[in-house]
Image: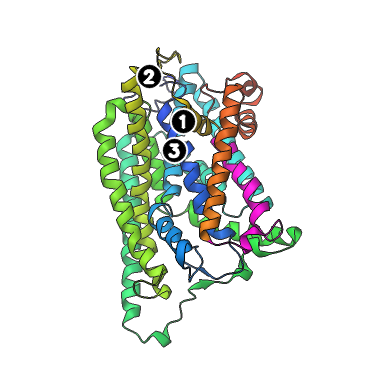
Amino acid sequence: MTDTPDSVRVADTARVGPPRALAPDLARGFMLLLIVLANIPWFLYGVQHGLSVGHPVGATGVDRVVQTLMIVLVDARALPMFALLFGYGMVQFARAQEARGTPLAGFRAMLRRRHVALVVIGTMHAALLWYGDVLGPYGILGLVLVPLLFWRSTRAIKVVRGVLVGLLALFAAFTVASGVSLLSLPQESWDTAVWMPATTDANGISSYAASVLPRLSEYAFILGFTAFSFSVPAAILTGWLWAREGVLDRPADHVPRLRRTALVGLPVAWLGGVPLMLVHTGVWLTPELSFMFIGVQMLTGLAGGLGYAAVFGLVAARLQTRSGATEPDAAGEAAEGAAPGPVTGALAAVGRRSLSAYLWQSVVMAPLMAAWGLGVGGRIGSAGAAAIAILIWLASVGLCAWLDRAGRPGPAEVVLRRVTYGDRGRSFAVGGGAR
């Protein structure tokens, strides 16, 4: 795609980038650990869940410790990180097609097919296994945001992102103000539907066939909330901006920026999660008021998602410096010494197969935890579920590392690539630009 009336530049300053950069894949690999941990509260059925916080209410002991860590470190932090990397990948994909000389009309069709496929895969994922699917919302946002903004100037994207963050800040202020005003009324007059009974949870239904429609119903709500929230589209736009500047493609060139993002974003996120954690666990105020800090959780979670991604940019930059490696050139030829170590390589292998690894989590978690399966989720607490989630993620790391050594892509990536490219998708290498 060149600068002619039939095409458009997708990056203001960055050169045609490498087919795969280490930092985004590292971040995706770690992100999937956060995702599986963030999902576990909803697989604990037969107990009351907070409406504003998915964790069971009244936890004690080690379960309470796990919930404390989850609310502060993970909840509403993994989703923006996922969204940022999703947006980053769009620009990487565009740059790879530009390097191949793909006409703009063909590239637009590829992106459209790709995002429609995500909606279809996400809906099937929700219907069959897990109503908390995020692929569908991201596909919808891709279908909406790309035609509106993808070819706009960096300035225009920054303005829209600023508006979204401003609206999120207003929402956070409104929810806090609502809670404060409620405190002025007698507690017996509150009517705040603070708990979500287990009977509304599709994971608590013992019949698989009977659980499908409730699962889709819950998915419809999550689909709308996620797709049209302010934090997720703001994170996607941030991913576009970072990719235009090559922040994660060439992290060694952006160390000061990445360091500032991590040193500011992570403390903001962790401190911002403290009020909701204190309210949910009953240390401060009362669980009925957890709704008043949900906006704060989302706003600071956006900062946390950027902070986590920045950390892996710094890790990649350090690995490059220690190995003396340089980034691959436009043709994808890597410098000597660029091969990552076994741990880094395994994480990156997960990142290169993030769609398959994400779906793998549900393939294992749902039948194991849900009442229509083995029903483990009805017999354990937050700590036990977290341990299972970590084991599932570790298994995905091992599987992806094995696939990487065999030179094989993830099965979901094969499907998505073939939908996106048609027959051309068969010929692209695992580590190539067919993202």
Image coordinates for residue 347, horizontal then vertical, percent: 48, 33
Asked whether disc 2 touches disc 3, contact meaning CB atoms under 8 Å apart, the reply is no
Q: Quadrant of residue 46?
A: bottom right
| Any part of residue 224 in sight | yes
Q: Give the range drawn in magenta.
A: 354-381
- Residue at image coords 40%, 15%: 337
Q: Answer above or below: position of 243 versus 335.
A: below
**Residue at mark 2 to residue at mark 3: CA–CA distance:** 19 Å
Amino acid bearing label 2: Glu
Q: What residue did someone put label 3 on? A: 85
Of badges 2 and 3, nearer the viewer stands 2
Image coordinates for residue 304, horizontal then vertical, percent: 35, 48
**Residue at mark 2 to residue at mark 1: CA–CA distance:** 20 Å
**Residue at mark 3 to residue at mark 1: CA–CA distance:** 21 Å
Tag of residue 327: 2
Q: Answer above or below: position of 418 versus 263.
A: above
| Any part of residue 86 in sight | no
Left/right of residue 60 with respect to residue 378 in the rendered view: left
